[in-house]
Amino acid sequence: MKKVRYEEPKMPESLRILMDLDAEDTLGRGTKKRGPKKYASKKTKSKTKSKKIDAKKPRPTKQVGPRKEVPKKNDKLTKKTKVAIKSETKHAKKAPTSQYKPDTKRNSTNNINGNKGKLKTPSRGLDDNKKTRKKREKSSKTFNFSNLMFVVIHGISVFFNFLLHGGEKKLSVPQEKKKQLDKKFNQVFSLVFMGLMVLLLVMNILHKDLPKSEAENRTLEQRPALSISDIVSGKYSSKFSDYVSDQFPMRSGFIKAKSRFDLLTGKDKINGVYIGKDGYLMEGFKMASDEVTQTKIDAINKFAQNNSKLNVSVLLSPNKVEIYKNYLPKFAPEDSQTEYMKVLKSKLNSKVKLVDVISTFNRLKNNEQLYFKTDHHWTVEGAYAAYEDYCKAMNLQPANRNSFTNSLASNDFYGSLYYKNAAGIGKPDQLYLSLQQDNNPVLVKYFDTKKKVASLYDVSKLSTKDPYQVFTGGNHTQIRIRTNIDTERKLLVIKDSYANAMLPFLVNNFSEINVVDMRYFTGSIKDLMNNAEVTDVLILGNINTFNTDASILSLNE
């Protein structure tokens, strides 16, 4: 095989500078403590350069390592050369600015003084740097979820910055072109905005006003009558604002969307409804101001004084938020209805009999289901318990509970609070009717519909959205009930919807019952009592409605 003489490659200038720096570092900084260092002199370096050894040529198809040669005994430069190469390797690792990359092919085939692999030392340090760089690149590719919110917020801010200010267009777009783009954007934005306004206006005009919100269980504001006095006083603008708020197109859809969002965010109170334990949905209670409560008490006291010959009584049923307060979410900031009843008792005239059923309900709540879970009303069990307390307070004999049979009217009753939360929370209730076995005949007249029927139940309402209307067919302005009970006592009930479930029990104690809902009644209570020869007056409802509704103030009109 033909041999070729080896020629020492020229040392790069960067390594030469490093060697000079290493030679001047007399303190030995950056190196481990070792024995006395031996640096190669200039003569040694020149001799090393002139020294030539033989090496094998690499094969064209396969890389072959260098041939081992036994070092000569008389070679005095071997140790010095090793020390110089080691010093070059250390400084090559320390200097980040040195971009030295050894020729791997040349190092794999060449040897100095027959010492195999000594020139591979610098490449080993560079391989370590490559591994570290790869690890950094790999770690930078992994997504950090803790920064997700920051990324979303930043993206939104960039989007709105682009819409409002054009982003960074001024850096890349000429000023004239930018003005044209801004002008087009403003035109498109104005047209879209005006289109939405016109669409909303048309929808408001075509939208049919609803009289009542089933989901919120309240009457909605109607279009106010236009008058100069209301415009001047500012009442018209206030009424019209309430009207637009109540009759807004797709209002129920927006309420449902908000409720869904509240549910996803983990809120315990959705659209005014608490999500309680054991499937109970409850409305909260906030006591009205002392001034508001006092005006209602004054109206009742004045009515009792003006009708001193009548037996006037008040029965306000507590709500679930008071009886099942242990089912509320923790730290629910609700006022006490027990305290509210104490205020009424202390301020009502002695001629007014206040029937407080809170203690009775607290005694029965673990044995009887007094309220529907998805509705704000009481069940027939709760209505009968209140009826018993009323009879005891007014010296009447209550009808025996065993004379009634509970009949299942609906197995999938979704009440008002189910629809009010608008998030689809709540399981269906069972709706029972208490049917009397001897079936005392009654004749019921509804003044608003001018219908006369022989029952206090309207079974057709069971297939509607509000099956609770099966009691008396829902709320009416005025009802007259005539019974076959032989007594001179005639009752006037001033009520809310709670009274509807209690009327089937009251018909056992009076020959005639007139029922008036002050929220819808526009006649005179005084004229009604004179014509009906009323002997007893019962203000019957629930605490929450009495606390918020002002219709009782028209009692003396």
Image (cartoon, helix red, strand yellow):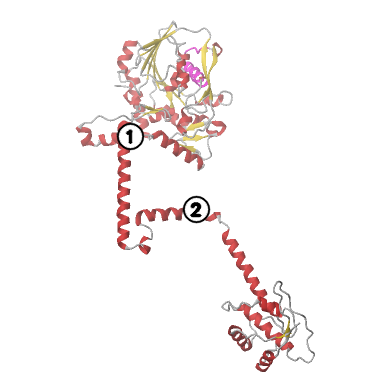
Rounded to the nearest angstrom, the CA distance separating label 1 from label 2 is: 37 Å
Q: Mark on residue 524?
A: none
Whether 528 is among the magenta residues is: no
Q: Which residue is mark 2?
A: 149
Q: Which residue is mark 1?
A: 203
Q: Considering the whole magenta stretch, tell me its main secondary structure.
A: helix
Query: Looking at the image, which residue sits at the far bottom?
Result: 43
The segment highlighted magenta reads 381-399
Of callouts 1 and 2, the N-terminal one = 2
Whether 382 is among the magenta residues is: yes
The x, y position of residue 343, in whole percent, is 42, 30
The answer to whether residue 29 is above or below residue 128 is below
Is 238 displayed left or right of 77 in the figure?
Answer: left
Residue type of the residue flagged with mark 1: Met
| The image quarter in which residue 167 lies | bottom left
Residue at 30 percent across and 58 percent down: it is 179
Residue 144 in view (yes/no): yes
Residue type of the residue flagged with mark 2: Met
